[in-house]
């Protein structure tokens, strides 16, 4: 595997969304600006995502990613659950 760039993503380039009441991390591709889901990855408290991240739209972007100002959200129960 070629050496990958290590990218620091600003806080406006990543976000949590809720899907079926579960937190889902989304990151914005710095090359094509699309938002992709980060699934089957672990995220350290430092914000480092493991393993590397690829563009959700297939533009070819592929990098090691660290999230600036990373924080977790707690799972919320959906309304009326
Ligand atoms: Zn892309």
Image: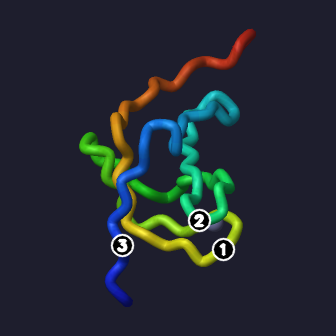
Closer to the camera in the image, 53 or 11: 11
Above or below 2: residue 4: above
Above or below 52: residue 78: above
- How would you rate the neighbour count of disc 3 (Cα within 10 Å): few for under 14, some for 14-19, many for 20 or more? few
Secondary structure of the residue carrying tag 2 is: loop
- The response on whether ligand 1 sits within 8 Å of label 2 is yes
Secondary structure of the residue carrying tag 3 is: loop
**Left or right of residue 53: residue 48:** left
Furthest residue toward top: 80
- How would you rate the neighbour count of disc 1 (Cα within 10 Å): few for under 14, some for 14-19, many for 20 or more? few
Q: Distance between the residues labelled 3 and 2?
A: 13 Å
* Label ID, residue 5: 3
Residue at x-position 65% and y-position 51%:
35
Q: How far apart are marks 2 and 1 (CA)?
A: 8 Å
Judging by the rendered image, the residue that carries numbered circle 1 is 59
The number of numbered badges drawn on the structure is 3
Judging by the rendered image, the residue that carries numbered circle 2 is 31
Percent of width and height locating residue 41: 44, 57
Secondary structure of the residue carrying tag 1 is: loop
- Quarter of the picture containing the N terminus is bottom left
Percent of width and height locating residue 52: 41, 68
Q: Given contact means CB atoms under 8 Å apart, are the residues at marks 2 and 1 in contact?
A: yes
Residue at x-position 69% and y-position 33%:
20
Closer to the camera in the image, 20 or 69: 69
Mark 3 or 2, nearer chain start? 3
């Amino acid at each position: 595997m070629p050496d990958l760039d290590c990218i620091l993503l600003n806080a406006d380039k990543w976000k949590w969304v809720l899907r079926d009441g579960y937190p889902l991390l989304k990151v914005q591709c710095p090359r094509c600006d699309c938002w992709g889901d980060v699934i089957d990855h672990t995220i350290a408290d430092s914000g480092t995502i493991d393993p590397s991240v690829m563009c959700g739209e297939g533009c070819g972007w592929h990098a090691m990613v660290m999230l600036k100002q990373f924080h977790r959200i707690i799972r919320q129960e959906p309304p009326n659950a």
